[in-house]
Amino acid sequence: MRHVVSVLVQDQPGVLQRIAGLIARRGFNIESLAVGRTHQEGLSRLSLAVSGDEGVLEQVEKQLNRLVEVIKVTDHS
């Protein structure tokens, strides 16, 4: 199943790598990725389209929310 998730993060080096690694370890494939700065200085938004099981997606969201750099995770599926 395809899921679209947006992640509001602190704009710091290595954040994208940590998020992509977490998603890969959970068995998701990133189908598309867009990253851009927000109107708030120091913050970026990642928009991800990923494929995988619904239960695994819930685990990924919980894991993302535990990362210090992550401000908010929103599932748009």
Image: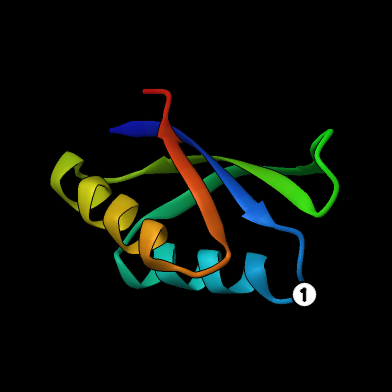
Q: Position of residue 73 (x, y in %)?
A: 45, 42
41 horizontally vs 31: left or right = right
Which residue is at a point 75% across and 50% down the rendered structure image?
A: 43
**Quarter placement of the N terminus:** top left
* Along the line of sight, the residue nearer the viewer: 19 or 38: 38
Quadrant position of residue 47: top right
Q: Is 4 placed above or below 29 here? A: above
* Along the line of sight, the residue nearer the viewer: 3 or 6: 6
Q: Position of residue 4 (x, y in %)?
A: 46, 31
Which residue position holds label 1? 13
| Amino acid bearing label 1 | Pro
SS for tag 1?
A: loop
* Along the line of sight, the residue nearer the viewer: 61 or 38: 38
**Quarter placement of the C terminus:** top left
Q: Position of residue 19 (x, y in %)?
A: 52, 65
Q: Is 15 placed above or below 7 here? A: below
Which residue is at a point 19% across and 39% down the rendered structure image?
A: 54
Quadrant position of residue 53: top left
Crowding at dot 1, Cα within 10 Å, few <14 / some 14-19 / many 20+, comes out as: few
2 horizontally vs 54: left or right = right
